[in-house]
Amino acid sequence: MTVALVVEGDTDLPYVRRLAADAGLSPWTEIDCGGKSQLDLELPGYNGAAHGSPWFVLRDLDNDAPCASALVASFDLPPAPWMCLRIAVREIEAWALADRKAIAQFFAVRPMAVPSDPDAEADPTQTLVNLARSSTSVRIQRGMVPAARASVSVGPLYESLIIEFGERAWDLDRASENSASLRKARQRLRELGARWRQHTGG
C-alpha cells in the first residue's frame, strides 16, 4: 500500500516516513515544498490528486492561526476522500521534542531540561537550540547553536542533526505519549491506511 508524502522541508521527512510505516503505507513519492508558502499554494492540487489515492500532507502551525483546526479551515478546501492533511503544533520540532528520552540522550542534556508538553512550546525550534546550549556535547553545541552575533537563529548543522535524530533516535511510540498533535496525526493516518486497504482489498 503506497502513499504520497508532502512536507515543508527535508527535516520533516524522517518523521512522516515513520508515521507512514506505522500506518502500513510506503511512500511512492516524497515532495519537499521548500517552505509552507509553496505547500499552501500547491495544496489544492494535492487535494485533487487525493481523489484517487492516499496523500499525507504535513504543515506546521507556527503562529499562522490560533489552532490547527482554524488553520485547516482557512484553506477552505473540502478534503478529498484519500487526503490526510495534518498540522504539527507548532512545528515538527515539537514532535521531535516529544520523545524526551531520546532528546536527552542525543542532545546530551539533563532529561528534566526537556519540556514535558512540547505542543505548548511557543517556538520549538528555539527550544531545541536552547537545549543545545546546555549540551555536554561539543558537536551538538557547535552544530545547533548559532555563532555570536550571527544573523541566523540556528547553527550550521541544525537541519542535518534534526534529520539524523529523526532517522536514528526518535521513537514514535514514546513521542506519541507526549504530543496530542502527533497522536492525532498518527491515528488519522492509520485510519486512512485501513480504509485504503479495505477499498483496494489489500
Image: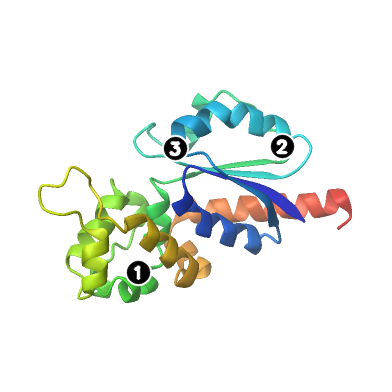
Is 13 left or right of 81, judged from the image as shown?
left
Counting from the top left corner in percent of width and height, residue 24 is at: 71, 61
Residue closest to the eye, 110 or 4: 4
Q: Is residue 70 visible?
A: no
* Secondary structure state at the residue bearing disc 3: loop
Q: CA distance from mark 1 to mark 2?
A: 35 Å
N-terminal-most mark, 1 or 2: 2
Which mark, by number, is residue 103?
1
Q: Residues within 10 Å of mark 3 (few under 14, many from 20)?
A: some
x, y percent for residue 189: 64, 52
The one of 40 and 34 positioned closer to us in this rendering: 34
Q: Which residue is mark 2?
A: 50
Q: Amino acid at mark 3?
A: Gly
At 34% from the left and 58% from the top, the residue drawn is: 117
Find residue 122 and report its image quarter. top left
Specify the quadrant that holds the N terminus: bottom right
Where disc 1 sits, the SS reads: helix
> Badge 1 local density, few (<14 within 10 Å), some, or many (20+)?
many
The kind of residue on which mark 1 rests is Ile
Using residue 197 as the reference point, say whether residue 9 is left or right of it.
left
First in residue order: circle 3 vs circle 2: 3
Question: Which residue is at 58% across, 31% downward?
Answer: 43
Query: Number of numbered discs present?
Result: 3
Across and down, in percent, residue 8 comes to 48, 42
Q: Nearer the viewer, mark 3 or mark 2?
A: 3
User: Dot 2 surroundings within 10 Å: few (below 14), some, or many (20 or more)?
Assistant: many
Q: Is residue 88 visible?
A: yes
Q: CA distance from mark 1 to mark 3?
A: 25 Å
Q: Nearer the viewer, residue 142 or 70?
A: 142
Q: Which residue is mark 3?
A: 35
Image spot of residue 49 (x, y percent): 72, 34
